[in-house]
Each structure stands twice: as structure tokens, then as C-alpha cells.
Image (cartoon, rainbow, N blue to C red):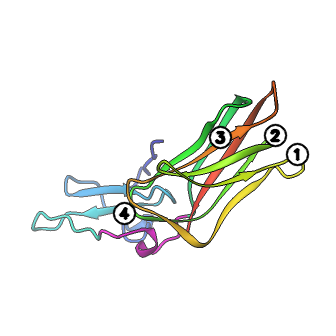
Amino acid sequence: MAWKFPITPRQDGDDESQSPGTSSRSLLGADPVTGATRRIMVGSDGLLRVNIVKDESSAGFDAGVLAIGSTGPINDGVLTSIVTHVAAVDQKISKVSCSGDGPADFTLVHNVTEIDIKRSSTGDLDKEFSFDDPYLISSGDTLTIKVYHHATGKTKTFNATIYGA
């Protein structure tokens, strides 16, 4: 998904009234979670100074929704990925919510390891993987939600959301 940058670049806390003109000595970046933009200026010495952080929490903002996905219609008996999130940096996962229009098994997979399975039923189609302590994934790791439904001869649609801590 491409981010649409504002016509007037922002700087200094995203205040539009303080936006400098664009130049070859600046870089405009967008926060992938909030969509907020910031302009970073190159110093007179030609260096671009940035702070590299270990994870989002040390960057000073809440990660919120990290990934949303949906799939369907899918046939019964077919294990299908709903959403996959690849961590750009070390991240903390607070919960994963899953739902669909029929009973199913939702599987949480970290890289290739199955972490947990939740089964929904006709009266309880929404399921959640929640963690008392945030679940940690390292930079480059993948977190995937897979679904397998048992409604013989029918197709169903499912969705999932991965939340950061």
C-alpha cells in the first residue's frame, strides 16, 4: 500500500504551519502505523541524523494495528492464511482477533511454529489470541493467522487483525 504524502511536507511535530519547502537536502518519511509524516533535514555537514530504536515502544508511540487481512470464500478442509505480518523491527504483540461467517480453527504461527489454536463455534464466531505479557517477535520474523473450516461442501469468509503492544 502506498502512502499519499501531503502536498505541503511537515516538520517539527507534524505542524503544517512550520513546513519547510522541499529541497535536495531533506527526506520525507511516513509512519506506517499512524500515517503521520516528518521531514528530516540534512545538516550543513552533509549528514542525516536519525535515531535507530529497538522496537516501537522505545520510539515513543503505540503500535496499534499492525496487520489486517481477510480471505474467502474458501472451501472446507483447506488450511488458508488470512494475514501474515513481517516484523521490520523487534515488536511486541498484544493480541490477535479472528472472526468469520462459520465455525473454524484459527492457528497462530510464528515463523513455522504453531503457537496456539482457537476453535470457533456456531454461537461464538469471534476468537482472540491474547497475551498477559506481550508476545515478542524479532526483526524479520513472520506472524501468520491460518484458518481451517469444517462446514462440509460450503465456502466461508474469514478475517483477522494483529495488534501491537
Q: Work out how far the residue at label 1 is from the one at label 3, CA to CA, in angstroms.
A: 19 Å
Q: Earlier in the sequence, mark 4 or mark 2?
A: 4
Query: In the image, 84: left or right of 119?
Result: left
Give the structural element (helix, strand or loop) at label 2.
Answer: loop
* Above or below, 87 relative to 12: above
The residue under label 2 is which amino acid type? Gly
Label at residue 19: 4
Image point (42%, 49%), residue name? 5
Mark toward the viewer: 2 or 3? 2
Looking at the rendering, the stretch of residues picked out in magenta corresponds to 52-63
Kindly check if marks 3 and 4 are in contact, taking CB atoms under 8 A apart as contact: no
Does residue 74 show up magenta in the picture?
no
Pointer 1 residue: 122
The residue under label 3 is which amino acid type? Ser
- Residue 53 percent across, percent down from the top left: 34, 70
Determine which quarter of the picture holds residue 18.
bottom left
- Residue 134 percent across, percent down from the top left: 56, 70
Mark toward the viewer: 4 or 2? 2
Q: Work out how far the residue at label 2 is from the one at label 3, CA to CA, in angstroms.
A: 14 Å
Query: In the image, 13: left or right of 143?
Result: left
Label at residue 102: 2
The residue under label 1 is which amino acid type? Thr
User: Badge 2, how many Cα within 10 Å: few under 14, some, many 20+?
Assistant: many
Pointer 3 residue: 70
* Above or below, 101 relative to 95: above
Image point (44%, 68%), residue name? 56
Does residue 55 show up magenta in the picture?
yes
Q: Earlier in the sequence, mark 1 or mark 3?
A: 3
